Image (cartoon, helix red, strand yellow):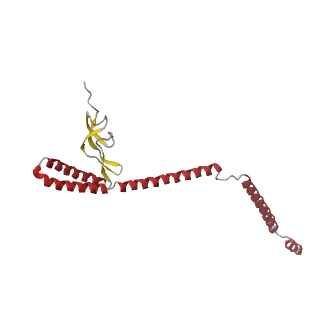
Amino acid sequence: MGDNVMNDEMDYQEPEEETTSVEADGLAEAADNANVDVDSNTEENFEPVVTTDALIEANEKVLRIQAELDNFRKRARRELDDSLKYAQLPLARDLLMVLDNLNLALNAAADNDAASGLAEGVKMVADQLINALNNHQIYAIESVGHPFDPNQHEAIQMESSEEYDANTVSREVRSGYRLHDRVIRPAQVFVSTGPETAE
């Protein structure tokens, strides 16, 4: 009997390996099915992240930014050109004050015969200064006989004139000057109202 018990124990085997193998196969199959389901689900419900409308909007934004950048470059270049073109504007204003004083000296010496020699020297200096200003594109504004222009002329007074039509500059009190196309200071002038009408 003892032998029978021993034989039974030897014949008996634990079913762990078989159960484990079956479970492993089941898990592998379940995993395969899960992968297939996930993949098929992903392909069916896939939507592109970037739509056509988004691409058009992004393209328009890029073009708009590029246009703004081009405008900024052009504006910066224009401002730089203007700053170089009108760089001597403060110096020109100061030199015009010197020229005004020279002209005052000439007017004062014109009535004095004894100062005629001195007046000649002052006039030479004034002419040299005017030539130097012209070399740097600084020119006197033409006034007398020209139509009154508020952008270039500063009207001091209206006066009747037999020589000039109405709204024409009849006299110049102080010369005006411009640098290139920019007025440094307007000319101070009298403006004609035309011939005096008889009452």
Image quadrant holding the C terminus, namely top left
- Relative to the observer, which residue lies in front, 10 or 4? 10
The residue located at (75%, 58%) in the rendering is 34
Q: In the image, 84: left or right of 34? A: left
Image quadrant holding the N terminus, namely bottom right
Residue 132 sits in which quadrant? Answer: bottom left
Q: In the image, 162: left or right of 18? A: left
Residue 9 sits in which quadrant? Answer: bottom right
The residue located at (49%, 54%) in the rendering is 70
- Relative to the observer, which residue lies in front, 140 or 31? 140
- Relative to the observer, which residue lies in front, 69 or 134? 134
As drawn, which residue projects farthest toward the bottom? 3
Q: Is residue 190 above or below residue 52?
A: above
Q: Is residue 185 above or below residue 83?
A: above
The residue located at (73%, 56%) in the rendering is 38
Where in the figure is residue 84, as x and y percent of width and height? 36, 57
Q: Is residue 16 above or below residue 68?
A: below
Where in the figure is residue 118, as x and y percent of width and height? 14, 54
As drawn, which residue projects farthest toward the top? 199
